[in-house]
Amino acid sequence: MRPTDVRIRAVSFAFEDFRYRTPLKFGGVPVTEVTLLNVTMTVETAAGAVAEGFGSMPLGNVWAWPSKEFTYGQTMGFMKQIAARISKVYGECNLVGHPIRITHELEKQFVSLDPNAPRLATFVVASAFDAALHDAYGKAHGLNCYHTYESPFFDDDLGDYLNADFTGEKLNRYLACEPQRTMPLYHLVGALDPLTPADVVSPVGDSGPEHLIDWIRRDGLTHLKIKLNGDDLDWDVRRIVSVHTVASQAVPERDYRFSLDFNERCPNVEYLLEVLRRVEADAPVGYARIQYVEQPTARDLRANPSNRMHEAAKLKPVVIDESLLDLESLLMARDLGYTGVAFKACKGQTQSLLLAAATQKLGLFRCVQDLTCPGASLIHSAGLAAHIPGVAAIEANSRQFVPAANEEWEGRFPGLFATTDGQLNTGQLTGLGLGATL
């Protein structure tokens, strides 16, 4: 056991439920609630120092386990069962070392815990445990986690975790030790969200924004993520043009950026190409503002080899989201014409860091998304975005859809859970561990 190594001494977990402020339509399904998985993990160093880490993540079952066979409650129940099994795996772990080394070994067991579970659902559950381990490790050494991804804490050869192309390379080459000071906020415009006062049918009535114009003016927004249907071409084109028009009217002098999120519902790449062509024809300025396109077609790349993105990627960066599970899926996506990736903390700190290195070496476009993460999970997600070079903006959807889960965090992290200039204050994410300490 090296002086910087740790071993796991205790693991516990609990669930926390919140109602959404307004429904969020995902993949054609309106979501109205969220369950957080909160994990506490205790580690001990070689010198006998003990530290407790905390990790939290929404169990986004509609996203991670989409199903026509099972109900929302059933898939949520399955993911809770997986949480108990993963807790046991970590709790009974005899490995010593760095969190990346430990989790990388344990991941081999996770996928066998429920053979019927999508790997993505298992990774979402495991991510809270992995976060707690990284958090505990940083605290055990009195450091922010991003200072523990270099020698003497972690100097492993990346070739042992990725492939031979990374032989001799170290992780710290691909990460910034200090976070970006500020990052633009990507605001989510859901398919159900009203754009103007005339669109408001049932006001929330809580003194918060009721429509997109309110949000833009209150928060100083410059980046808008537009949720689309993927199965109604006319509606999708109108929605993009309408968001562009409304934003331009709300603050005419502002230079906006848009991302388009189809949540894998486009039937083929021709659908995406037609959307882009028609938007360019109807609103050329709006088209120019499109920064990238997220996961337009089915997540199972191997089962859908005809979904090649080469032509679309000549127009805009096309990134994988749900498809990104490991280096193999990343390389497959690249071969199918994808030119970027969307990292999510809910796929695990360990995996996100390793794939961040891979995407940079491959020269791919990079963005970070947050699965509507509140509280500690947003701090975790924001930390990734602020430390991976090349990530231009950050998502923070919880301030829109589940602000109640952020209330106890807002005062401790000013400018991260709320903004008035369209920027989030990521420069403050320098605390011990992952920094999510109340």
Image (cartoon, rainbow, N blue to C red):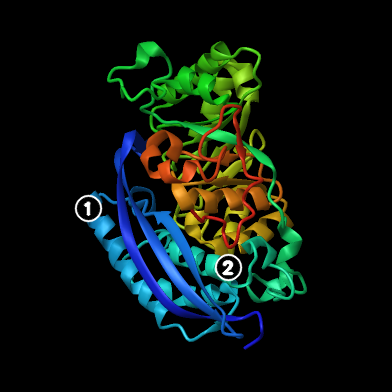
The quarter of the rendered structure image containing the N terminus is bottom right
Viewer can see residue 298: no
Q: Nearer the viewer, mark 2 or mark 1?
A: 2
What amino acid type is highlighted by mark number 2? Lys
List x then y, in percent, for residue 20.
32, 38
User: Does 198 sit above or below residue 265?
Assistant: above
Residue at the disc numbered 2: 139
Q: Residue at x 66, y 21 (%)?
A: 255
The residue nearer to you, when weighing 12 against 105, is 12
List x then y, in percent, for residue 56.
43, 57
Q: Residue at x 58, y 63 (%)?
A: 433
Q: Classify residue 33 as left or right of residue 52.
A: left
Residue at the disc numbered 1: 73
Neighbours of disc 2 within 10 Å: few (<14), some (14-19), many (20+):
many
What amino acid type is highlighted by mark number 1? Gly
Q: Splitting the image into 4 quarters, where does residue 21 fall?
A: top left
List x then y, in percent, for residue 321.
51, 49
The residue nearer to you, when weighing 332 against 206, is 206
